[in-house]
């Protein structure tokens, strides 16, 4: 137990990097505990005691209590900050995009990136549905950005940070962002706002 | 545009029924717009204008603005109610379970139920990973209930409502709850608290 936030995370995982981005943006001190998802480190008895789901990121809050699920950690760290819109409807749309990202975006773009980039699978051994689902997610984002600068509206929110994490790495999953110029501009805008090195 | 909440939903979908459970529990008046996921009703031009993701549930708020994603709708409807814990850590854990449900529970238990119960697929044509993933989710819940009455703690929260929707229908996905007596008791407890007819 320390008096500082600890983050168990894999530096190659967008879900884990989201926590780092928010902590650094909000100047919250933290200790990063590198925990590789391919090393078995999330399946040890000790880790499963802290997070029975066996997943990173896992935050150990300054009081020693554990918190899992990337978006839940983001919401906890950002409470009271401008990353959570004050307007109830905008806040509801931020939640809409946070849940959409985990259900319809990450499950295609991050999953295909993992299989291609980390497991080294050739394209013909990857479920073709992932490519279709991922491009549908990217198209939805591109359409949203025709009338907004950020997600859900016109100021940086947690939804941008959740969405940018894997969108900026989508090429590693074999996704071509050339047909998505607004998304490419938005990635740079979010990277500059955070900033992401 | 009406001055009442409208919910576009499929009565067979746990994600849609969650909204009904919360609206009824909190005595929020609503109009239910039956929208079958197998009928193409979520793919019409009109529907896609309201929700580009083409999914139900979709709420049209009393002021006419749309809101998608079941958990985002739940959070909006329940704002300020006892279904969202006042304690920051308990609230964070509620979010943890809301995101976990959509990522690790629904994607196995609801998906297998859909394939078996709605599409009528025989077991040997269903990805066997769904059974394993679903039972792992059920075991995590059973373990949690060894030391808590509800999710995340000891009073009914949105996490219970999100989790109960498909857990109570898990048998339709071929999941046997016999090894999960605490989960079976919790289902009855949540059904009684809501109540679910």
Image: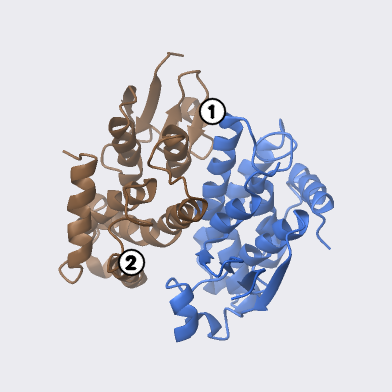
Chain colours: A brown, B blue
Sequence-earlier tag: 2 or 1? 1
Q: Is residue B105 left or right of residue B165?
A: left
Label 1 SS = helix
Residue located at (30% from left, 45% from top): A14
Kindly identify which chain the residue marked by label 2 belongs to: A
Q: Which numbered circle lies on residue A189?
A: none
Which residue is more in the foreground, B56 or A107? B56
Query: Which residue does the numbered mark 1 point to in the structure image?
Result: A49
Q: How far across and down, in percent of the image, does residue A126 sit? A: 30, 65
Q: How far across and down, in percent of the image, does residue A11 sit? A: 27, 37
Instruction: Tell me where residue A17 sits by quadrant.
Output: top left
Kindly identify which chain the residue marked by label 1 belongs to: A
Q: Is residue B138 left or right of residue B65?
A: right
Label 2 SS = helix
Query: Which residue does the numbered mark 2 point to in the structure image?
Result: A144
Residue located at (27% from left, 52% from top): A119
Depicted A7 relative to depicted B141: above or below:
above
């Amino acid at each position: 137990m320390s008096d500082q936030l600890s983050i168990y995370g894999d530096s190659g995982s967008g879900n884990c990097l989201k926590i780092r981005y928010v902590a650094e943006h909000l100047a919250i001190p933290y200790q990063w505990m590198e925990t590789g998802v391919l090393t078995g480190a999330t399946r040890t008895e000790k880790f499963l005691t802290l997070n029975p789901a066996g997943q990173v990121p896992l935050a150990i809050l300054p009081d020693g209590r554990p918190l899992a699920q990337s978006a839940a950690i983001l919401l906890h760290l950002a409470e009271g900050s401008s990353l959570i819109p004050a307007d109830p409807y905008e806040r509801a749309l931020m939640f809409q995009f946070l849940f959409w990202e985990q259900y319809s975006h990450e499950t295609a773009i991050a999953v295909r990136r993992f299989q291609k980039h980390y497991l080294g699978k050739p394209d013909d051994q990857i479920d073709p549905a992932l490519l279709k689902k991922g491009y549908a997610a990217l198209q939805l984002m591109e359409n949203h950005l025709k009338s907004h600068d950020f997600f859900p509206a016109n100021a940086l929110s947690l939804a941008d940070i959740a969405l940018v994490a894997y969108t900026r790495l989508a090429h590693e999953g074999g996704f071509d962002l050339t047909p998505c110029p607004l998304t490419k501009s938005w990635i740079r805008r979010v990277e500059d706002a955070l900033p992401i090195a």
